[in-house]
Amino acid sequence: MKLHQLRYAYEVRRQNLSVSRAADALHTSQSGVSKQIQLLEDELDLHIFQRNGKRVTGVTEAGKLILSMAERVLHEIENIKRVGEEFSQQEAGVLTVATTHTQARYRLPAIVSAFMQRYPDIKLHIHQGTPTQVAEQVVNGEADIGIATEVIGSYDKLQCFPCYQWNRCVITQHGHPLLDDAPLTLEKIANYPLITYDFTFTGGSLVNRIFAQAGLEPNIVLTAIDADVIKTYVNLGLGIGLLANIAYQPERDSNLSAIDASHLFPPSTSYLGICRDAYLRGYMYEFIQLLAPQFDRKTLASKR
């Protein structure tokens, strides 16, 4: 049994049973992946995958157990590599952070700047996506740290820590009637065309629930996963916008006005997610502490 055989089989499952996509991800040939999996099955004298001709169609019961064990083995191999790097290359390495556009655009710039000054030889990658994509990238080992709201906390393989809370504001063109119609209410918001986050994204489901509890249905004319897109269409006069308050910056957004809406919605929490059994290098702990000062290395280690 070879380690790369386990890696090939695991990657096929991770790529939704596509041998071709697994080969691309592993930078090898499709025939090579198939051959190595076949050799592994021959050695074990069982089938890991169900097949229809040459096409992989499912995972056998035995295969589910084997791939679960293979996942743990491959994860521990990665941890061993990180331990070696921690002691041999303390100031060098790679950090991959998966997060949403709002976090990457409005929360992380100062943190990334401070981190890169402290660790100029660390290669930092930021992947943007939906909260679901963020969580899955961490679970799949494609990212070391995930930062998102709501969905990320529902993944059993992730250990999540609350970083900070945020709420919402309504943005309008200058001179909009809402600016002189205090206090802001859900009923008043519902009277205007609304541009906001997709309801599966960045606290959108909470917003939907609050309107429903009030017996209201907002007139949503456009949804987006990007706060800058929301601001663009508000500026065009297509409606008012509802977005995270950290996404409105008076100096940069001087063409728009904002009204605080935090009294209408409960705060949302942004979480930091890491794999439960992942080994974190020292610079990873420092990035986390820059993001959430309440979590130093000792505090995090005590909770893992």
Image (cartoon, rainbow, N blue to C red):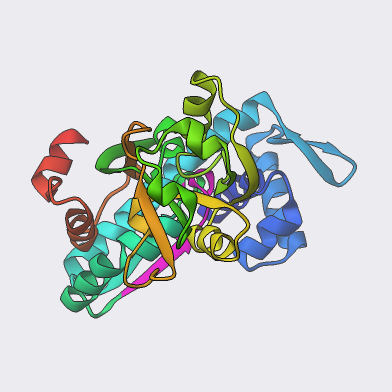
Residue sitting nearer the eye, 179 or 126: 179
- Report the residue that reaches farthest toward the right: 53
Residue 156 appears in view = no
Residue 258 drawn above or below residue 207: below
Residue 193 appears in view = yes
Query: On the picture, is 74 further left or further right than 7?
Result: left
Identity of the residue drawn at 34% across and 31% down: 266
Residue 248 drawn above or below residue 138: below
Picture coordinates of residue 227, whole percent (x, y): 48, 58
Query: On the picture, is 293 further left or further right than 196?
Result: left
The part of the chain drawn in magenta is 123-134
Picture coordinates of residue 46, whole percent (x, y): 69, 32
Residue 62 colored in magenta in the image = no
Residue sitting nearer the eye, 117 or 8: 117
Picture coordinates of residue 243, whole percent (x, y): 44, 49
Identity of the residue drawn at 59% across and 53% down: 239
Residue 166 lies in quadrant: top left
Quadrant in which the C terminus is drawn: top left
Residue 13 lies in quadrant: top right
Picture coordinates of residue 146, whole percent (x, y): 38, 50
Residue sitting nearer the eye, 172 or 3: 172
Identity of the residue drawn at 74% across and 53% down: 19
Query: On the picture, is 107 further left or further right than 130?
Result: left
> How many badges with numbers are in the image?
0
